[in-house]
């Protein structure tokens, strides 16, 4: 429990399930965790890429009264939005590349025609 950390590329759902397994095991041994302890533990074990989201949550919410479900919902929403942004970046790149390729093809075609016309004038 003390060394629990988020694994690289691990989803929030998997992270929480692993934490739940550990806390349930400790519950069987008599250790009981409060909501505020679980909220703080979950926030504290996130990777550095989550730092801005953790700071935003810590500054805007009262962690003593925050429900674990509310935290999970917020983290999962952020995770989905980040994934959508990455996907949008790929789509935008593909659109720009296609546009660039079309423009280059058109320019090459125009240059060939221009050169032919110029060549015939020179003759």
Image (spheres, rainbow, N blue to C red):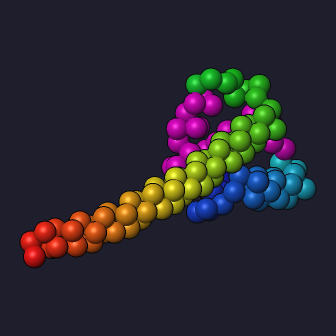
Residue reaching furthest right? 28
Q: Is residue 9 left or right of residue 35?
A: left
Residue 42: give x, y in percent of width and height: 69, 45
Say which of 60 and 28 sits in front: 60
Magenta stretch contains residue 48: yes
Query: The magenta stretch spans which residues?
Result: 32-58
Residue 55 part of the magenta-drawn span: yes
Whole-percent x, y for residue 95 in the image: 51, 56
The vertical placement of 66 against 33, above or below, is above
- The majority secondary structure of the magenta stretch comes to helix
Q: Is residue 78 above or below residue 57?
A: below
Against 120, residue 37 (above or below) is above
Quadrant holding the N terminus: bottom right
Residue at coordinates 80% horizontally, 56% vertically from top-left?
17
Instruction: Please state which of residues 52 and 113 is positioned toward the viewer in this rendering.
Output: 113
Task: Answer left or right for 9 relative to 25.
Answer: left
């Amino acid at each position: 429990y003390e060394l629990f950390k988020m694994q690289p590329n691990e989803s929030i759902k998997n992270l929480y399930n692993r934490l739940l397994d550990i806390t349930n095991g400790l519950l069987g041994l008599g250790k009981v965790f409060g909501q505020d302890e679980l909220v703080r533990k979950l926030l504290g074990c996130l990777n550095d890429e989550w730092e801005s989201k953790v700071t935003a949550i810590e500054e805007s919410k009262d962690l003593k009264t925050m429900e674990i479900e509310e935290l999970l919902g917020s983290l999962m929403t952020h995770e989905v939005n980040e994934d959508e942004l990455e996907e949008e970046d790929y789509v935008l790149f593909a659109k720009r590349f296609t546009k660039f390729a079309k423009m280059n093809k058109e320019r090459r075609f125009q240059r060939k025609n221009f050169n032919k016309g110029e060549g015939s004038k020179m003759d």
